[in-house]
Image (cartoon, coloured by chain):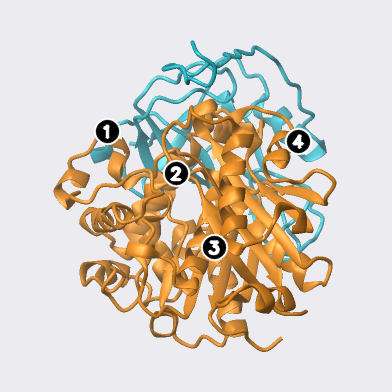
Amino acid sequence: MSAVAIIGTGQTRHASRRDDVSQPELVREAAEAALADAAVGPDEVDAVLLANMELFEGRALPELWAGAGAFAAGKPCMKVATGGTSGTSGCIAAFHQVAAGLFDLVLVVGFEKHSEGHSQTGMALTDPFWDRAVASGALGNFALSISQYVAERGATAEQAALVAVKARRNAARNPHAHLRMGDLTVEEVLSSRMLADPVRLLDMCPQSDGACAIVVASAAAARRRSRRPAWVLAAETRHEQPYIGDIDRRLVTMRTLRDAARVAYRRAGIGDPLTDLDVAEIYEPVSYAELAWYEALGFCADGDAGRLVEEGVTGMEGELPVNPSGGVLSSNPVGASGVIRVAEAALQIHGRGGERQVEGARLALATGYGVYAWADAVVLGAEAGAT
Amino acid sequence: MTAGAIAAEPLGVACPMDLGWRYASGAAMERFLAGLRERRIEALRCDGCGRRYLPPRPLCGDCRLPLDRWVPVAAAGTLEAWSVYRLPILDGRTGEPRPTPYGIGLVRLDGADTTINHLLAETDPGRLRIGLRVRAVWREELRGALDDILHFEVAR
């Protein structure tokens, strides 16, 4: 396997409705921004990878039209659809293609227009024998898992609210973010409408329209074209058993993310992630999940996640800023959200994070989370690792 | 409107659909569903790890072994996770809005090692907690589907 880097990123403005653009126009907005950032022309791209959950919009073969928005005609083009991990897995597929020597430049575009469909009912259209009579979308799945996590690890509603406040305040410094709430308080989160005990409205991510793209380059292309490539030091993905009830105490154990992170850290030479990493962009669709991910990702001991957010360890001025972008809690166009995590991590290495830049970031983590069935971990660095 | 101007309300097209799908159960699920019609619940046990799977399925994901050893499971068990769902949502079977609030839970039936995701009769969060004993409330006319169990009620 040869070294791979990200040399450009681009994303749309994310919002509850982007009626000003069609789905392929939304894709083009992100694709053009990433290509411009990388100074790569559309003709120079060797292959295109798309990420999207077409059931949400109820539009078959969206890649036909979205592919045009990503300049894919006449090129190898395929799509990844694995729920919330669609975007991170799409990026990982592109890393594999380039690392295998198949291509020098691959464009990855993740996209979703939730406003055009029925996302929660789309989520409920899972297994017709076991899920449909009872399924309650992403929120129902999370609420059940959170009840176990809270009971076992002692996380509190106040600690979850601190995560929600951190995300939306960080988002206020990200011009692309959907929910930019620079003045949000813990009290406002705790008094927002209860959606599914114990999850309140402001604990939950929005449904966004948006797209995000990255340009993946071979080592030679990256060195030729970029002054500061974000090198891919590790990229791991894990699948899980099929049924929600198969996984004992899911948020507590979270073996997919634990396994993916453990292997990714080893490959990237990371001993203690909290001190070694400079920044993390993690896929947290609900405030409580961020606490569970801290533990699964080894940022702290099990049961200690609340302290990290109480003491500001994962705030912008803390030891390990988590989600300077505002995270999934502030923008969630599902097919794009994983690409956004990787793009935001790359942006930090590129040193082009603007108001949300973590100064001197040289080692960044991005993660993906796909319902209860997938988890991804990607480590990017300012220097190419051993190949 | 002059060429190039953008309408205040962008043009869109509404696409309502009323379609039906039919899914085959497969051999393991067929036996399970036929059992439900007689209020009988069965799981498949893995010879490798001993795990008793509900829903029954042809393979153990962890051991990669085929499953064919059926074991009986009770219609009562322990509540392992719960919530009270309050957000409007469409039912995945009918497309109709589901009345809210409703209770949801993961129930470990006696004799199974996995938990099943189902509805709860109780909607007061103050009366729900992990570890409660619950039992199935059956539909009068059994059809051979998971919702032959209407919901689980707290056993008192």
> In the image, what residue type sits under mark 3?
Val
Q: Residues within 10 Å of mark 2 (few under 14, many from 20)?
A: some
Left or right: A75 with respect to A84? right
The residue labelled by disc 4 is A64
Q: Residues within 10 Å of mark 4 (few under 14, many from 20)?
A: few
Of pointers 3 and 2, the one earlier in the residue sequence = 2
Q: Nearer the viewer, residue A381 or B107?
A: A381
Q: Which mark is residue B124?
A: 1
Which chain is depicted orange?
Answer: A
Q: Identify whether A319 is placed above or below A17.
A: below
Discs 3, 4: same chain? yes
The answer to whether residue A15 of the structure is visible from this angle is yes
Q: Nearer the viewer, mark 3 or mark 1?
A: 3
Q: Identify whether B82 is placed above or below A324.
A: above
How far, Cα to Cα, is label 3 from label 1? 41 Å
Tag 3 and tag 4, C-beta contact below 8 Å? no
> In the image, what residue type sits under mark 4?
Leu
